[in-house]
């Protein structure tokens, strides 16, 4: 049995049903992101003019100020709202910050090393999922929808490529702070903190809550053609939090995933490595099998250490 790290909420703490809590969370995210979008557009207009604001919206990368505008848009309309909403919800609506955000360090520090190892050995498995995902397609009746999703993903990739065009080491550090650290904290507070906690209490099933949260996490990114690997990452992050009782294990994993992409991109751009970050045919079948076995072993060790179980307790 998995030890349930979430404490029961007393009636005096919260009289809102889990369904209503989810509605509040989703509505708040939508509302605050909209406000953030217009605020970001205002800041961009103030700093660079209305033409740059329009070019940011249309991904016109010929404008030299668009890159900075994209960063402003990312931080103000996405990163900050994703952080503010769960913190405000946990503190002022749920009134139980400790249970919802789980921002504690009450776990063995060796779990950080195990998370690092799991993320390191997961690359071949993620490659398999990426390649499977790329072969998936919607029914012919939904071809228009598929074409639209493909176009949206291409546009998002153009924006990402522009933002991660790193000419200096300082550019890489800035990208690490925003894309890896701040994004990891914000998204984990929202998904593995608030949403997963609500779903655990609604479904009464930890495993179901982890998988549903992982699916919502992947769907939120609106990238159909990387949906499966992001679900897998969400599942890893979910179990890290459930077993350790702390959000920082998943924040660390999320940081490693995003940060490694930033560093590899930087090294490739500066011709320090020959491996392209977009190459999804790096490993062979033996690597896939080895990766899966090692991940399962490491997850088992992580679980038993986190829950203080004997190492051979099945």
Image: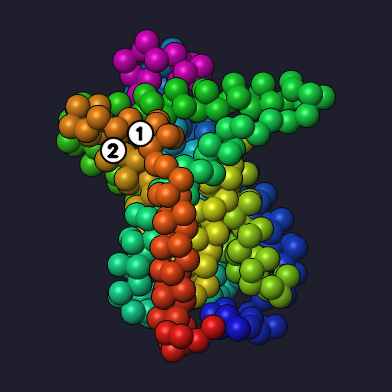
> Label 1 belongs to which residue?
277
Would residue 237 be counted in the magenta stretch?
no
Q: Which residues are magenta?
A: 53-71
Q: Which residue is mark 2?
A: 264
Q: Is residue 78 visible?
A: yes
Would residue 139 appear left or right of 93 to someone viewing this image?
right
Q: Which mark is residue 171?
A: none
Query: What residue is drawn where x is 52% and y is 67%?
Result: 239
Q: Nearer the viewer, residue 53 or 194?
A: 194
The earlier-in-sequence mark between 2 and 1 is 2
User: Could you say which is closer to the camera, residue 210 or residue 311?
Assistant: 311
Quadrant of the drawing holding the C terminus: bottom right
Judged left or right of residue 250, residue 181 is left
3D distance between C-alphas at marks 2 and 1: 6 Å
Q: Tell me the residue at 38%/46% (across/down).
A: 258
The residue lying toward the viewer, choosing from 252 and 62, is 252
Residue 287 picture location, percent across and down = 40, 49
Q: Are marks 2 and 1 in contact (CB under 8 Å)?
A: yes
């Amino acid at each position: 049995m998995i030890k349930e790290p979430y404490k029961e909420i007393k009636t005096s703490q919260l009289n809102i049903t889990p369904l209503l809590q989810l509605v509040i969370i989703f509505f708040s995210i939508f509302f605050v992101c909209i406000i953030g979008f217009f605020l970001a557009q205002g800041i961009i207009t103030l700093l660079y003019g209305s033409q740059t604001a329009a070019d940011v919206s249309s991904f016109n990368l010929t404008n030299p100020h668009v890159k900075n505008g994209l960063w402003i848009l990312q931080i103000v309309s996405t990163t900050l709202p994703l952080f503010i909403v769960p913190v405000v919800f946990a503190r002022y609506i749920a009134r139980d910050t400790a249970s919802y955000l789980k921002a504690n360090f009450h776990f063995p520090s060796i779990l950080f090393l195990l998370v690092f190892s799991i993320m390191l050995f997961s690359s071949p498995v993620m490659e398999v999922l990426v390649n499977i995902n790329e072969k998936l397609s919607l029914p012919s009746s939904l071809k228009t929808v598929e074409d639209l999703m493909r176009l949206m993903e291409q546009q998002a990739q153009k924006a990402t490529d522009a933002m991660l065009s790193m000419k200096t080491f300082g550019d890489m550090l800035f990208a690490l702070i925003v894309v890896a650290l701040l994004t990891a904290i914000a998204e984990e507070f929202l998904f593995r903190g608030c949403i997963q906690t609500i779903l655990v209490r609604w479904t009464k099933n930890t495993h179901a809550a982890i998988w549903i949260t992982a699916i919502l996490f992947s769907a939120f990114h609106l990238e159909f053609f990387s949906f499966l690997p992001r679900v897998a990452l969400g599942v890893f992050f979910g179990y890290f939090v459930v077993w350790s009782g702390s959000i920082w294990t998943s924040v660390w994993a999320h940081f490693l995933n995003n940060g490694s992409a930033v560093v590899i991109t930087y090294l490739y751009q500066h011709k320090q490595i020959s491996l392209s970050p977009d190459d999804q045919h790096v490993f062979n079948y033996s690597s896939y099998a080895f990766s899966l076995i090692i991940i399962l072993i490491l997850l088992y060790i992580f679980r038993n250490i986190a829950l203080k179980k004997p190492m051979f307790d099945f």
